[in-house]
Image: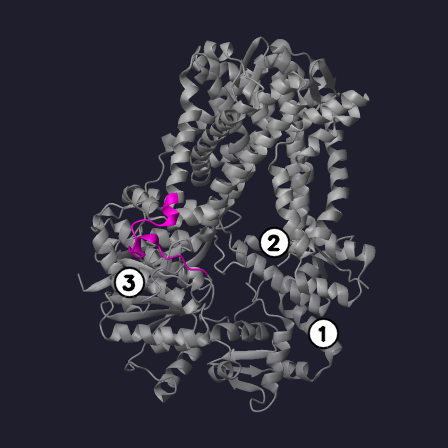
Amino acid sequence: MSDALLDIHGLRQTFPKADGGELLVLDGVELKVSEGQIVGLLGRTGSGKSTLLRLIAGLALPSGGTVTYLGHPVNAPAPGIAMVFQGFALFPWLTVLENVQLGLEALGLPDAEIRKRALAAIDLIGLDGYESAYPRELSGGMRQRVGFARALVVHPNILLMDEPFSALDVLTAETLRTDFLELWGDGKLPIKGVIMVTHNIEEAVLMCDRILLFSSNPGRIISEIAVDLKQPRNRLDPQFRDLVEKIYVAMTRRGPSAMQTGSERQITFNTVLPRVSANLFSGLAETLAAAPYNGKADLPVLADELHMEGDELFPVAEAMQMFHFAEVGDGDIKLTDTGKQFVELGMDDRKKLFQRQLLTYIPLAAHIRRVLQERANHFAPKSRFLDELEDHMSTDDAEHTLRAVTAWGRFAEVFAYDDDSGAFSLENPS
Amino acid sequence: MRVFVPISVGGWDRLFSRWDVFAVLLIIGLLVFLGEASRHLFQPLVDLQRSPPSLDPAYLPEYAARTTLRMLIAMALSLLFTFTYATLAARNRNAERLLVPLLDILQSVPILGFISVTVVFFMALAPGKVLGAEFAAIFAIFTSQAWNMAFSFYQSLRTVPTELVEASRNFRLSPWMSFWRIDVPFAMPQLIWNMMMSMSGSWFFVVASEAISVGNTTVTLPGVGSYIALAIQQQNLRAVGWAIFTMLIVILIYDQILFRPLVAWADRFRFDQEPGILVPESWMLNILRRSRIVDRLTHPFGALWRRTLIGHPSDSLATIRRASQPRRGWIIFQWGLVIALTALALWQSISFLIEGITLSDVGTALLLGFYTLIRVVVLIGLASVIWVPIGVWVGTRPYATQVVQPIAQFLAAFPANVVFPIVVSLIVAWKLNPNIWLSPLMILGTQWYILFNVIAGASAIPNELRAVGANFRVRGWLWWRRIALPAVLPFYVTGAITASGGSWNASIVAEVASWGNEHLQAAGLGAYIAQQTDAGDFHRIVLGIVVMSFYVVLINRILWRPLYEYAERKFKLG
């Protein structure tokens, strides 16, 4: 055996679909984690990276493939693998100290040792003085520190982090990242390896030694990027910027990629649609059309400028591409002629153009319109379309997709939807 | 923001504090109370009949103690039932399919009808001893407390946030540990609220369950309930007054020393992590928390309890094992069991009913049920017309809310059947039509649920929305239609469901009333059940119960549940 802490082989995960079929969310994942590494799992929402983390934690069982931890298969929560949660997952009725002690109590250690180790962890993570506070009395940053202390106190070999900083404000998140990296670099943390899920590209480059990029639907590892920069890393360092750019390019590459790009990737009836409002559309189109971009922008630069994270920008870019308002590729976004035309029009004409593009390029919208026209009363319940969609995607995705298309249809005045009766119709209140 | 320093790490500068004095007195008082109240349990039944209850108010403290003890024992049993039944329902998919609908039906069964059916069984358990009758009474009270508690616990278990469950699994808490550390705390605030509702509700049944008479068997257990029954029999209005006064005191006492502390204590189990605007306070809890003696006395028990929660040392990886799939045979066995039990129950009830019931009996019961249905509908309508505007008026005025809200809650807790005799004596005196004038009794105790829910709803209307209303000069009917009524609708529906269910139950005591030798009766299903109970006709009692349950379930399914879902979806603020 090698010195691999964790060895993942041919891992796949499916969820049952409404029609009895299976929905593939994670496929063919191969991963080896060695001692002393921070491995980042980077991908869009719905790329299965959180699912992968839960499989490693033994919180779910894979449909195929194996997770091997120190030579043993993981099929239940394993000792030595501890997790830090996105929403902190603190027990509000337990004090900071009691929250931290919980994992040790489950190990059945003697009281004195539980107390000693818990206090040591609290001390290490900078929570001194907060021992008797309840989580609700703490700020978000302090709460996540409790989350870290609770995970570290059991001296895990592997620390799993599920977007641990995404619920925090920018400054707090940065402080926590720096503190964590400092403790890790000084070898003060009782852990041998870290696997963290993130959708924040800069965060991944800042913290990780290896970054695995995931595609969406199903989640597959599409590329692996090694980060050889020395800690502490500087966001303004040209090498750092290069890596960020490289990841953007990789994520927007044609073919199987993190984003659905390229016109060759046909949008069909079953494509999961991003929920992007028409306002965001217009906003981004106008920004792109104006100086200094003049129709073409580098995605990382644009994200920085708009104070958006990649995960927020990608869906908008993707939606614009679906409408043929823009083309995305190689880390860039470029307005098409239709896109430029869209920007120049007034509100009413914009709606008309939007309507044309919607009915031409989004098959689901055209489908709903057609069904409504065919019916004598021009009326169809939401459940009719939802059921159709659920044959091809998960319940959540179906709901999201239908909402996205409803919002677009309303904006374009292609059809109306009444939430009380849950029905689509051709009539607009006049 | 208040921070409680855990008592054990506080300073040890003085051995005793004034809080200790209070605490010790309270504990001694509690012990004396328990001893006094349970002394008579093992008396032979004959002794009880030799010393019949007396209307002398001097006996009332003892009666009150015994009644309260029955209620507390029933509460303990209800908790036990809640923790087992609801946990099984929430954890076992197969069990859930059966247990949840069962609970829903049980909730709708008129408990007062139950009593007569169960008393014979329990008397047989401890023949000749007071204990048997006590069991029967406690069981009756238990049935009035347990269902909604179990339901609330089940719903809480189903809604424990996924991340908390994952965290507990990640840190490998044993099932026992995660039950007490996660499930129970998470469910606690809701459960305590339901315990309070149950306790209030069960007063109603205390009165009925202590003076049990089915056909020829009559047992009178010493207690407030039997005291009232005797007072009614002897037309002693003064004694009724004493009983009401005693109940007031008892309710005040257990509210202060039991529920207030529980509510204040459970505040920390609230899941929303924002600091609360109003932190519930309890002097009793403060005493217990600040007393060092209490801390010292309870510490060993606490430590012992914690030991059971601690997992077993198992650091080896060998313990990782695939969660065992339930065996096929076991599943078949379970289904077989369910089918066999259902078939047995079906056969039993059909043969039981066929034996003594004709089709015309069923028709009668259905018709009478329809009369009672009309009463309930009319009364809920009337109560709504009266209390919704008042509730909105009060709820939109913070000062009025502060004054009225606790009173409304107290009135909902007060057993209305205690004041029945007064109303009945008036009906007798003025020779009023019982078909009309007995009806309001059904809603006397339950209308308050409408009031205090509407107050809560109205006071939850955001200030901004009210400001918008004022800004656009929305007034009069438009204001009610567009702002007030939609905002309180979800709350109103919650209150109305409780009120309607309670009224059906109350009909069993409200449609038949007596004052000394005067017996009043209204035409209705409640009166039917009460009559058949007096006659000891088990077939017709069961028929009455089944028909009433049928009506309640029907109304819940076709009216209240859709209305509630609609209100939740459309008018929920925020």
Q: Reading the chain from its start, which is encountered first: label 1 or label 3?
A: 3
Same chain under badges 1 and 2? The reply is yes
Q: The residue tagged with tag 1: helix, strand or loop?
A: helix
- Residue B316, position as x, y percentages in the image: 20, 50
Q: Which of marks 1 and 2 is nearer the N terminus?
A: 1
Q: Image quadrant for the C terminus of chain A? A: bottom right
**Which of the two residues, B229 or A389, is positioned nearer the viewer here?**
B229
Pointer 1 chain: A
Asked if the magenta segment contains residue B193, the reply would be no
User: Is B404 on the left-hand or right-hand side of A61?
Assistant: right
| Relative vertical location of residue B358 with respect to residue A179 in this rendering, above or below | above
SS assignment at label 3: helix
Left or right of A39 on screen, residue B486 = right
Distance of mark 1 from mark 3, alpha carbons? 55 Å
- For the residues labelled 2 and 3, the Cα–Cα distance comes to 44 Å
Q: Is the magenta stretch mostly helix, strand or loop?
A: loop
Range covered by the magenta-colored residues: B2-21
Q: Name the residue under label 2.
A: A386
* Residue assigned mark 3: A152
